[in-house]
Structure formats: C-alpha cells, structure tokens
Image (cartoon, rainbow, N blue to C red):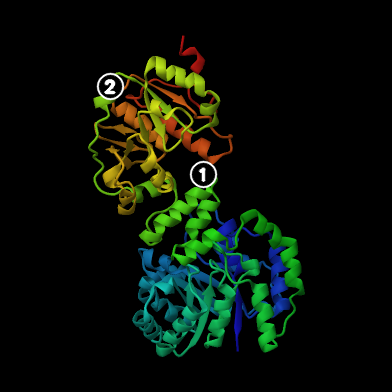
Amino acid sequence: MIKLLDCTLRDGGYYNVWDFPTRLVTDYLSAMSALNIDYIEIGLRSIKTQGFRGAYAYSSDSFLNGLRIPKRLQDKIGVMLNGSELIEYENGLECVLEQLFIEAKNSPITLVRIACHIHQFETCLPAAKWLKDKGYQVGFNLMQIADCDGVEILSLAEKASQYPIDVLYFADSMGSLTPEDTAKIVKMFKQGWQGELGIHAHDSMGNALSNSLRAIDEGVSWVDATVTGMGRGPGNVKTEYLAIELRSRYQRPGSVTALLELIRNHFDGLQKQYGWGSNPYYYLAGKYGIHPSYIQEMMSDSRYSDEDILAVIEHLKSEGGKRFNLSTLEAARHFFTGESTGTWQPAGILSGKEVLILGAGPSVKQHRHAIESYIKEKHPFVIALNTQKNIDEELINIRAACHPIRLLADCAEHVNLSQPLATPFHMLPEDVKKELKTKETLDFGLTIQVDKFVFEPTACSLPNSLVVAYALAIASSGKAASIYLAGFDGYSADDLRKKEADEVFSLYQHHPDSLPLQSITPTLYDIPSMSVYALTK
C-alpha cells in the first residue's frame, strides 16, 4: 500500500521561516483530511534558537496541542529533525532527543524522521532505537543520494538494517535524477534493505513526479509531496498531481476539492510572493549537481542579475556546487584562497596623484563630456570598476575587479578590454585564472575581515568583496592624494545594495589612513559631493 506524506509546512517553511498563518493551517489540515492523506509532516523539531523562526520550525507538543487537528489525522502527525543537530550538540545525541521528545503516548506526534547527509548517517543511527523505545515510528531521510555509487548505497542499506527504522528514505536533493537513475537507486537499496523505502523528490529539472511514480513502480511505498510543490529551491512533487495519479492508479480514496480551494485561497498568492517552482536556473543547477539553495538565495536578492546567476552556475559546475556560501562575506572568504600578499605595489604609479574611480551608474553617461574634459585637463589616475564603458576607454588607466560574482560574469569580457586588470590574481580559483591567462593583471592581494580596512603595499583587508572597497584600498595603499567618484548614483533607501555600500563608505571615511573622498556626479550614498563642472576651467 502506498503511503502519501505531505510535508508542506516543513519544507515550505524554507521560504517563509515556518511562519504560516493560522487560517491557512486550519484550511490545510481540513484539505489533508479530505484527501485522506496518510501522514503530515507538520514541521521541524529543533533546539536551535538563533534568529526568528515561526512555530513550525519547532512544532512543540504544546503548540500542536492547540491546533484543531481533524480526528482522521490525529495519529498521522510527524516532524523532522535535522541530523546535524544530533551530531553538533556537545552533550551528545541522547541529550538532544531528551530535550525534544517525550513518550509518544503523551505527544501529538507519531512519526519522527531524521534528515542527514550520508557521512552523518552512521553517527545518527542510534537515535532510531531511542525514539523507537519512546514509542515513535522512525524514518531516516538520506540526502544527496545521487552522489553515491552502488557500493555506498548497499553499505548504507546494510547499516540501516541493524536499527529499528520503519522507513528509509532517499532524497534527490539536487533534483538531478532521472526516472532511470531513480530505478537503479531503488534496486540498489533493496539489495541490503528489506524494510519500507521512501522517496523525497525535488523538481529542479521537472522530474519530481515522474521520479516518484517510477520509484513506486520499483517498490517504494512512501512518497513525499507538498501543496503546489512548495519547498526549498524549486520545490517538490506537487501533492495535487501525485494525489490525482495515485487515485487513477490505485483507486485511492479521497477528495481533491478542498485541496484545490486551499491552493486558490492561500498557495497561489504565496507562490507569487516567494516564487518557488522550477525555472531554467534550477534546471541547470539540477543538471550540474548544484544545490538549489544557491539559486533560491540569488533569486531572492536584487543584487544578482541574470548574468550573475548564470556565471555562478558556470563556476559551481566545475567546483562541485559546494564551494561557497552566497552571502557577500562568505563568498569572498571561500572564493579567494592562499596568502593575501600580492605582487603589485600601487604606490609605484599612484603616489601623490588624484584618483578618479568610475562606477557604472547612469550619471557617467549623462555627464560624460564633463568627466572626459576633467580627465584631459587634470590627468587623474582613472580606475574603472569591472567592465563599464561609459567614457572614452583611452582615458582609463586600469580596471579593478574582485567581487566573486562579477568576476565570474565578466572574465571573457575582461580579456578583450585593453586596460590592465587589478585583481587578487594568485588567490583566484583555477578556472578563473585559466580564463584570464592571456590578460595583463596587477596582482593586489585581498582578505575579508568584518568591519576592517587595512592598507598594505601589495594587499588589503576589506569588510566585504565590493569592488568599490577594493578600489578605495588600491588608492589608499598607493598613497594617492585624494579620491573622486563618478557613477555612484546609489539605490533607494530600502535596497540592500545601498545599505551595503553606505557601510563601506562610512567605515572607510572613519579610517585614520583614508583619503579625502568626494562624488563628482549625483549620488544617493552618504558621501561628500561636488560638481564635476566645478573641476575644469
């Protein structure tokens, strides 16, 4: 008999921090009851308290006892525990479990599933006996199973067989499996595991439904789904689609009417707000085995353009999808490797000079004639950021690039530009170095340290990897006389990019070794300004 488990409130919580409105949950539970769902994974169970997360990130017994759970579902409620919490807690696995679970007979929970990576599995397995002794049904979800070969899967299955596990799941974490791949994995598990098998399918490449159905054909008896596919990254197989298929195949009882009303009244709006579901980026991520969280984070951040996202995918394709976290700080920390000392000393050409840093804002093009007149008359040293081309290129001395995403996006274009490129060259990943092997580069080292500017002869430390911070450091390390900025138009007050840049400018201007700094074109940033038209005769 096929068991359909809906995990919308658990997996969908990655979009709204598990903070679901009461009315939505009430309607959801009614719809699941009408659908005759076998199990609901109502949320996570967690000991982590940092940062705000809604009630379904913890799914405490006291909270669940306050829900109006339909009678048909009252012995079908489950939670998921991340295996990493069992491993990382210094007082040990049993101490975590004792904090989170009471005897099952006194809890609204009947099923506990533990999600873990394959390298965590053996360490987490003793939790199965502890939970079973407390009266719970126990499931294990093995993540990123597509990375395993047959020998590894057989080993995992044999280890699972030594513990009282009710259902052993495998998750297509990257959404990269095909139905044929899925069939092979099921067959390999069945060689060493005689218990019930389950599948948790992600929809990166649009295969979640077909993979789930193929798994059922091969003997899997537990299948996960979420309403409209709501779940991390591209989401999962849709409950509404899978329910229709199971009804057609097995004459499974249950009505989808309340579910369709739930979608219309609640989930259509949520999907428009958060944007889960497969798209070309998730498809590429699935194809190249890249974790979908990279795509989800970039798509939710206005700083990443289409070009940026494609460049990151291209880079992660060769790096294995796990090289860096997408926050600006973590990206730079992991992107740049090796010693931070470079080989180029900016003081050799900048000492005592005015420096003009050119950004990419529209004001450069709008005031191009005045900027070019100033350069021709005053002869500042001109540093253009990245690949912008809004003035006569012969007036640009060098270009600067260090932000990981921009570098990935612009490598090919830099090769065709005539100016030398200042960048932390020897610290770049090998695939980026290879792209730039024919380019004249000025190797100025870089490390990232929170809230710090440090200016050294051949390297710098910056608070983040924004290229304007790098250019400011080049000018300061080069002992320039002053800095003018053009093309730093800025963003609206509620834009993350404005806040990030303002923090850089503030930190720089308060540094004892900072240089006089002024914008000569209109700017929304919190920096001194003057008119480019006042700089020439």
Q: Circle 1 is placed at which residue position?
A: 303
Q: Which residue is rendered at x = 66% and y = 81% of the image?
A: 245
Q: List the single residue furthest toward the top.
A: 537
The amino acid type, in three-letter code, at marker 2 is Ser
Side of 236 where 125 appears, left or right: left
Q: Which residue is rendered at x = 26% and y = 45% of the image?
A: 426
Question: Residue 97 got which mark?
Answer: none
Q: Earlier in the sequence, mark 2 or mark 1?
A: 1
| Label 2 environment density (alpha carbons within 10 Å; few <14, some 14–19, many ≥20) | some
Q: Nearer the viewer, residue 128 or 394?
A: 394
Q: Nearer the viewer, residue 279 or 247?
A: 279
Q: Secondary structure at mark 2?
A: loop
Measured as percent of width and height from the top left, residue 512 is found at 33, 24
Side of 91 where 41 appears, left or right: right
Side of 151 where 43 appears, left or right: right
The amino acid type, in three-letter code, at marker 1 is Arg
The quadrant holding residue 509 is: top left
Measured as percent of width and height from the top left, residue 366 is found at 55, 26
Inspect this view and state whether residue 332 appears: yes
Measured as percent of width and height from the top left, residue 261 is found at 76, 67
Q: Circle 2 is placed at which residue position?
A: 351
- As measured in the structure, the alpha-carbon distance from the residue carrying label 2 to the one carrying label 1 is 34 Å
Measured as percent of width and height from the top left, residue 191 is found at 41, 89
The quadrant holding residue 375 is: top left
Inspect this view and state whether residue 78 appears: no
